[in-house]
Amino acid sequence: MSDAPLAFRSIWISDVHLGTAGCQADYLLDFLKHAECEHLYLVGDIIDGWALKRSWYWKQSHNDVIQKVLRKARKGTQVTYIPGNHDEGARQFLGLMFGDIRIEDEVIHTTADGRRFLILHGDRFDGVVQCAKWLAIVGDRAYGITLRLNYWFNRLRARLGLGYWSLSQYLKHKVKTAVNFVGKFEEAVAAEAKARGVDGVICGHIHKAEMREIDGVLYCNDGDWVESLTALVETHAGELKIITWQTFYAEQQAPRLIAAPDAPRQPQALPVGKQSTDLSMEKRVAA
Ligand SMILES: [Mn+2]
């Protein structure tokens, strides 16, 4: 049994959205390169078929991610692919093997300490929750813009002889509903797990990494590789945790810093071309 920090028993990733400009394939590649596991679960929305139908966007790094996964499968990692709504085309192949990769709609994973987890993407709960999901993504960052928009909007309304109507108030209410959406989604998924008699559930879909107990079951969401760069991992002892690429990367660099005490104590330079993205990530983390 290896207890090296980068060797896990299982890894769950989802919502990679290969085929879109938002996909952070380079970071995911770096993560996959340095993290080993016995079980790899791809929990949906790995390839964004919807976006590719609209306009073709495919970079070398997107190929590399797929190659990396195939390589892991060849080398003995058990890879399970659970299609999501953005890659629903793969749902016609449920129950089949593609090379070394198993395609399933949902599976049960038993952790090293014997707990049973239901794994699914999560989009089937959209209907239950019935809310505008995109608002959760827009969030309050757009609030400043809407305030300005509100001003011009109401000047126009006044000129047309109409009364004041608060656009920002309206959107604020909608954002609040979106926040509710996340909570309601999590509760709906947890309720399903409870009904199935498992100890917990692992899903993706809403791009919000989370691990908390809801009504007696452990709700886990592995997040995404568009914005938050997160994965869920299981250690060899059966402990589950969410890791973010930023932390993972820092830990990866740590041994080198110790090995070279004379090195200037500056943050490690990121691979070329990633600095700007990383800055915006820090902002996101702080937000
Ligand atoms: Mn989805």
Image (cartoon, rainbow, N blue to C red):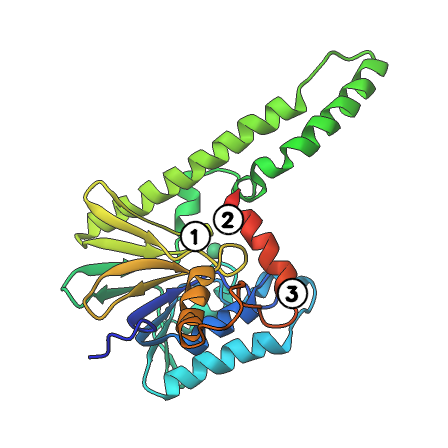
Q: Nearer the viewer, mark 1 or mark 2?
A: 2
For the point 43% across and 52% down, the residue is 123
Closer to the camera, 210 or 181? 210
Residue labelled 1 has its Cβ within 8 Å of some atom of ligand 1:
yes
Residue labelled 3 has its Cβ within 8 Å of some atom of ligand 1:
no
> x, y percentage for residue 208?
44, 49
> x, y percentage for residue 247?
43, 60
Circles 3 and 1 in contact, beta carbons < 8 Å = no
Q: CA distance from mark 1 to mark 2?
A: 25 Å
Mark 2 nearby-residue class (10 Å; few <14, some 14–19, many ≥20):
few
Residue labelled 2 has its Cβ within 8 Å of some atom of ligand 1:
no
Q: Is residue 155 above or below residue 255?
A: above
Q: Secondary structure at mark 1?
A: helix
Marking on residue 53: 3
> x, y percentage for residue 172?
57, 27
The residue carrying mark 2 is 285
